[in-house]
Image: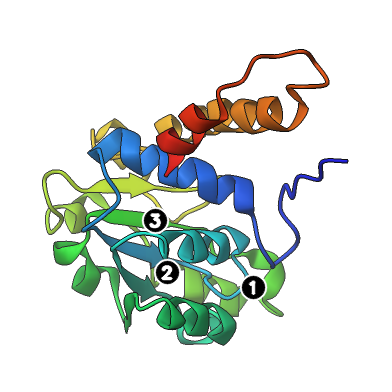
Amino acid sequence: KPLVNAGDGTGEHPTQALLDVFTIREEIGTVNGLTITMVGDLKHGRTVHSLARLLTLYNVQLIYVSPPSLGMPKHITDFVSSRGIAQQEMSSLEEALPDSDIVYMTRIQRERFSSQLEYDKACGLLILTPQLMTKAKRKMVVMHPLPRVFEISPELDSDPRAAYFRQAECGMYVRMALLAMLLGEKLNLHVNYQQYQNTIF
């Protein structure tokens, strides 16, 4: 029987990765040749774990920006490295923005901190603001798996580079396609599997 991983704790979130790649293609037209920056709680963020893995199928460069204690897990960076994908860590959004084609923001997860003070300190380090966006490319795209907390200023919602709401809409269609592929025969649906594969990859 089909089994769909809809997100497993701090591990992986493969359906999110599929919709993220689909969104990148919708927004930019390709994935190859892009510099993709992942920001926030990369240690516990299951969406970035799956996305980093999936992006190794493409010719990309990855940048990681996080608080020191919340970096990308070693088993993920080891996997990315084994696939020959360039990756680097940067200490701030300001440093990473000028070279980024995609900025993939994630929330700092309150439940991972023992005190409110430590959480507030970590949150304050990585906030995408209109002022910071002046350093970004004109065609850069901002993504977020949602829910958003404080990491993206609401003022950016009207910026055409803010793709996170369009990203959420893409998620509905990609997951519909995935369910159709898995259940199509049983539901007597005529699904062109190759069409979906070409669309995502």
Dot 2, crowdedness within 10 Å: few (<14), some or many (≥20)?
few
Q: In the rendered structure, which amino acid carries the disc numbered 2?
A: Gly
Q: Which of 86 and 151 is in front in this view?
A: 86
On the rendered structure, is 70 left or right of 112?
Answer: left
Identify whether 127 is placed above or below 2: below
Instruction: Tell me the SS state at disc 2.
Output: loop
Residue 163 % position (x, y) = 35, 37
Label 3 and label 2: CA atoms lie apart by 17 Å
Residue 38 shows which numbered tag? Answer: none
Q: Residue at x 25, y 38 (%)?
A: 29
**Residue at the spot of label 1:** 116
On the rendered structure, is 139 left or right of 31?
Answer: left
Quadrant for the C terminus in the image? top left
Instruction: Tell me the SS state at disc 1.
Output: helix
Identify whether 17 is placed above or below 72: above
Instruction: Answer with the quarter of the image where residue 193 lies.
Output: top right
On the rendered structure, is 83 left or right of 31?
Answer: right
Residue 133 % position (x, y) = 19, 53
